[in-house]
Structures are given as C-alpha cells and as structure tokens.
Image: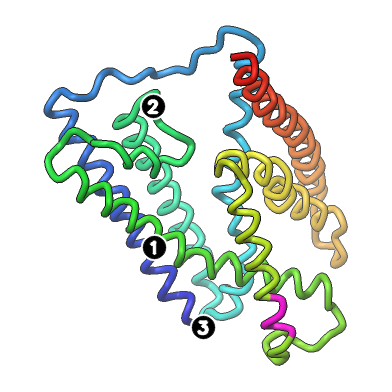
Amino acid sequence: DSLSYTSAISVALAVVFVVITAGIAIVKLIRGQIPMPKLFPAVPDLASVWELFTAVPVLVTAYVCHYNVHPIHNELKESSQIKPIVHTSLALCSTVYITTSFFGYLLFGESTLADVLANFDSNLGIPYSSVLSDAVRVSYAIHLMLVFPMIFHALRLNLDGLLFSSARPLSSDNRRFGVMTAVLLLVIFISANFIPSIWDAFQFTGATAAVCIAFIFPAAITLRDPHSIVKKWDKILAIFMIVLAVTSNVVAVYSDAYSIFHKKSASSNA
C-alpha cells in the first residue's frame, strides 16, 4: 500500500521532467536557437553497425518491470482490472520515454549524453536557466528515489525465495529481512559508485539479465507447461523467443564490449 503512493508521486515527477524539458525545447525552437538535428545515424563502416546494437539492451531494460504484475494482481479487489492497468502503464511509460528522448535530442542534438541530466549542468540559453536546470535534476532525482523501493522490493523478495526457499516468509523474519536489506543496499551502493557510466550499466544488464527476464524465462516456463495448457503455436513462439533472445544477447554483449574497448584504445592512442 505504501509503495502505491511513492509510485504515483514518481510518475507525476517524471511527467514534470518531460513538461519542463519540452517547454525549454519549444521556447528555444521558437527563438530559432535550435539547429536542424540529424535524423539518421552515421554508419560509415561495419563497426558503426555493431554500435547500433548497444541501444537495444537499454530499450529492453526499460520494459522489464512485468515481474510486479503478479503481486499487484494478487492485491487487487477485482482481478479483471489487471489488463487495463497493464495497458495503461505501458502506454504511459512509452509516452514518457518517447517524449523525453524526442525533446531531449531536439534540445541537445549531438551533444546529448548517456545521462541526459548531465546536459542540464550547462547554461540552456534561456531566462531562468539555472532554476529550470535545478528543477529538472531535483525532480528526476526524487523520481528515481521513489521508484527504487518498487524495484528493490521485488529484488529482495525473489532473492530471498531463491536462497531461503524452505524458510518461513520474509515478512515474519525481521532479522533476515534486515540483513538481506542491508547487504543488498551495500552491494548496490558500491556498484553504483564504481560503474563509470549508467549507459554501460544498462548495456550489460539489458543484454544479460533483462533479456532473461523478458524473453528466456517466460518462454522456458511456457515450454515446461506443467499443467498441459499450452498450445502448439505457443511452444513454437516460445522457441522462437529463446532463439531470438540468445542471438540478440550474443550480438549485444559483443557490440557492448567492442564499443567499450574501442573507446579505451582510441583514447590511449590519442
């Protein structure tokens, strides 16, 4: 119940972020301060083609919160509400993602960084630039803080079920709950400080864990079919999903590693 309020506020703050970014871009566009952005990526060689695949894991990561569907479904008074809830969530998230990327790229063009919030450190070239930049960064920082408990809740619950499957429920064991929470928070904090770029984190988690959660695990459950309710077409689709996921996984990991090591070799030669 408490997570429902934090989630609602986080969505509202994400909308605030989009509105401010769109407003700044529109104002600068009216003033003629925005040049024509590049509509298509430059692909001069084969290496550039591989670099395009580095964006795919990031997109996959954005849509791997479906593991929260079942806990939410169990808490609904009317189970029939789950479908419109899922459809509304996907539509809202897609709208926020698309508008953020569109106005962010329109505003910063080729200077857009992996973490777009870093672009708001500079002067935006409009009145009250510093105030708007601070509003964007503060709103999105609070948004991330409020989204974290929802993701962390699922992580802690599933990891506890994996490690202590025969133990009593986590909610009734305060000591195990506290120790697991502290350990996970410490690991996440240390990892966040040592990862050089959020883009690198999303690349590899999207190419490995996100692909498993989104495609391989659901397809494997479908193929197992313990209740014998899966049709032949469902199994064919599940096999196709696994093959597609493994193939894209290998290509994405290779392209991510190639991109990182290529940048390091280029910087060392320079």
Q: Which amino acid does label 3 sit on?
A: Lys
For image coordinates 78% across by 46% down, the residue present is 238
For image coordinates 12% across by 27% down, the residue present is 31
Q: What residue type is labelled 1?
A: Ile
The residue that label 1 is drawn on is 142
Foreground residue, 13 or 198?
A: 198
Q: Quarter-wise, where is residue 269 in the image?
A: top right
Q: What residue type is labelled 2?
A: Ser
Q: Which contiguous range is marked in magenta?
A: 176-180
Q: Residue 111 carries which label?
A: 2
- Distance of mark 1 from mark 3, alpha carbons? 30 Å
Q: Nearer the viewer, mark 3 or mark 2?
A: 2
Q: Quarter-wise, where is residue 181 in the image?
A: bottom right
Report the side of 209 relative to 5 (left or right): right
177 falls in the magenta region: yes
Could you say where residue 39 lies in the image, as x and y percent from the top left?
39, 19
The residue that label 3 is drawn on is 77
Q: Quarter-wise, where is residue 160 in the image?
A: bottom right
Residue lying at the far top in this picture: please name it: 44
- Distance of mark 3 from mark 2, alpha carbons? 48 Å
Main secondary structure along the magenta-highlighted residues:
helix
